[in-house]
Every structure is written in structure tokens, then in C-alpha cells.
Amino acid sequence: MDGPQSAGYVEEYLRTLGDALPVSDRGRRPILTEVADGLHCAVEAHAQRGLDAVDAERAAVAEFGDPRQLAADFSRQLTVACARRTGLALVLSGPFVGMAWVLASGQGTSVVSNVVSLVAAVPVLALVLVVGVPAAVMASRSSTSAGTAIVAAVSAIVADALLMGWLLARASTATGMLFAAAGLSATRAATATARVRRIARLRAAAH
Amino acid sequence: MRAEALKGHLDGLLLAVLASGPAHGYAVIEAIRSGSGGTFDLPTGTVYPALHRLEVAGLITGSWSDGEGRRRRTYRLTAAGRRALVEHRSVWTQFSGAVSAIMATGT
């Protein structure tokens, strides 16, 4: 990355920035590539103003500011993006998971009667949905906050746990469709749990 | 001038710079420095998360290219970004006019 006369300031800056970014290698790579390009532009600009190679590197990293602060700024931006993606994922997956349980659980004559009997069987579910659905819709908007997305994701996890608990209580009579719905819920709950952890990590790094 | 003083206006400045044509991050911050006569001397790193935020919001779009032995991300304004810039300019004209009017009181 650096030329043969590199003093190592740029590499050290990028290493500190990379270490402070709580994202995967896949998420970290484009950020470091872009900042590296900017740092090299800065080194070239300072060299053109007459600084030698070492001083040009030192001036470039000073110009960029504290790498930990830059990581915090990136984390803040990534927190919002992750919160929004979480909200969108819950808004899109919610109807599928919900419909799978409704169709699999009921013996009623209509979808509405199936919904009524499912909510009657798991009353707390209605309360969780009253909190979780609006939170997911709000989290899917561009001006969302990490807290809203966490509320939405935790609501989904609780709803899935309630439904799977209800299924376990009647496992001996459960149909294959109910186990398929439980599979969907388990997948969503695992994904939502991972998202909550990621948002919490990003939010912690943003401060 | 510190970054805090520009809070709320940085997005408009970035969009205004990119309205002149596509640019990479370092060129954008250099344009802000030179365009402000050195008044807006932000840490260069500040510009990158801000550009990412504008890209996520759909106001600019970024693309990678290879050149000078390294990869570079270049940003350009989208149609939504042009509309947002018009709004930023309108708000700024109103805001700066109101502040100037009050500041001139009693001089």
C-alpha cells in the first residue's frame, strides 16, 4: 500500500481505524480502501507543497483527524443503516411468518377465525405485536434510531418464542405445517438476535 | 472553523460541491477548504462517513474505479440529491438572511 519510502504513519492510521470498526472484514474493506486512497491523496498533496516523504505522511494523518473518532463517526452512520435494514427485514418477513402460523394453526373456517383462535391461545402475542409492528415500520424509515430497531427486533424474538412455546405445549398433536412455521420463526428469531447484537456493538462504538 | 459549527450544513455543502461534477472524497474536502477560503478546515476524515450517509439516503451514488495503482470511490449527485440541494439552498438563504437581520440590529 505504501511506497518504499513509507514511514508507516498511513498503515498505522488504517490499522487503528480498522481495529476500531465493529464490522466484518467484508464491511471493513471498502471503508479502509476508500480512506487509504484519501490518505494517499493527502500525502501527495503535502509532498507537492514541499514536505519530504516522512513529513508528508505525518501531515496527512494529522489532517485526517483521530482514527478512533473517524471509526465512531462511521459506526454512527452504520448503526442507522443497520437499524433501517433490520426494520425493513422485519416489515417484509412479518407477514410471511405470521401467515404461516395462522394457516398452520387454525382449524377455523377462515383466516380471521384462525387469527382469533391463535391470539386467544397466546394472548400475550397481541400485546407484543402492538408494540413490535409499529416499531418495525418506524425502524424501516430513513430517520430511524437504533433503539426503535432494537425494540422491533426484540418484539419479533419474543413473538417467535411465544409461538414456538405454544407449539411445544401441543407437540404431540402438531402438524407438519406447524413445524414448518416454527422453522420460519426460529430462523427469524436467530436473525433478529444477530441484528440486535450488531446494532448494540455499532451503537457502543459510535460513542 | 470546527466541525460542530457546520453541524446541519455539512450535507448541503457536500451536495453543492458534487453539483459541480463527480468527485472522490479527498477532492470534496479540498473543494470545501478552498471554496471557503480555508474557513472550513474540517478533519479530512469527517467527509467519508458523511458521504456514506448521503449515499444510503439516495442523494448521491458512489462507484469504484482503478487508477494510479489504487482503488478509488467517486461520488455523483442523484436526481434526489439535486432536489435536496435546492431545499438546502432555500433553507440556508432564509436562515442566513434572518441571522444577518438580527445581527445588524443596533449597529
Image (cartoon, rainbow, N blue to C red):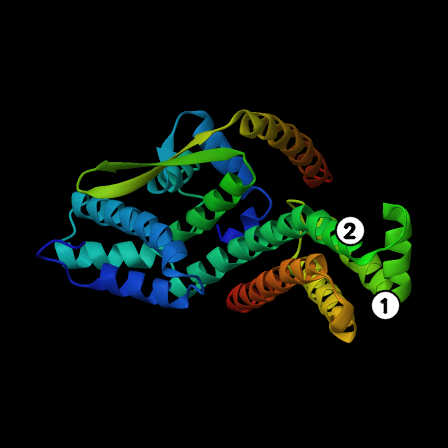
- Is residue A67 placed above or below B64 in the rendered structure? below
Q: Residues under labels 2 and 1: Cα distance?
A: 20 Å
Which chain is disc 2 placed on? Answer: A
From the top left corner, tell me how far across and down residue A71 is, in percent.
Answer: 43, 61
Picture residue at 60% right of the left edge, 61% below the top: A187
Residue type marked 2: Leu
Residue type, numbered disc 1 = Val
Q: Chain of mark 1?
A: A
Dot 2: few (<14), some (14–19), or many (≥20) neighbours within 10 Å?
Answer: some
Q: Is residue B105 left or right of residue A37?
A: right
Task: Please give the residue where the numbered disc 2 appears in the rendered image.
Answer: A103
Q: Quadrant of the C terminus of chain B?
A: top right
Binning the other alpha carbons within 10 Å of mark 1 as few (below 14), some (14 to 19) or many (20 upward) gives few
> Quick one: SS at disc 2?
helix
- Please state if A9 lies on the left or on the right of A164 as rendered: left
Q: Is residue A66 visible?
A: no
The number of numbered badges drawn on the structure is 2
Residue A88 can be seen, yes or no: yes
Write the residue at 71% across / 63% down: A151
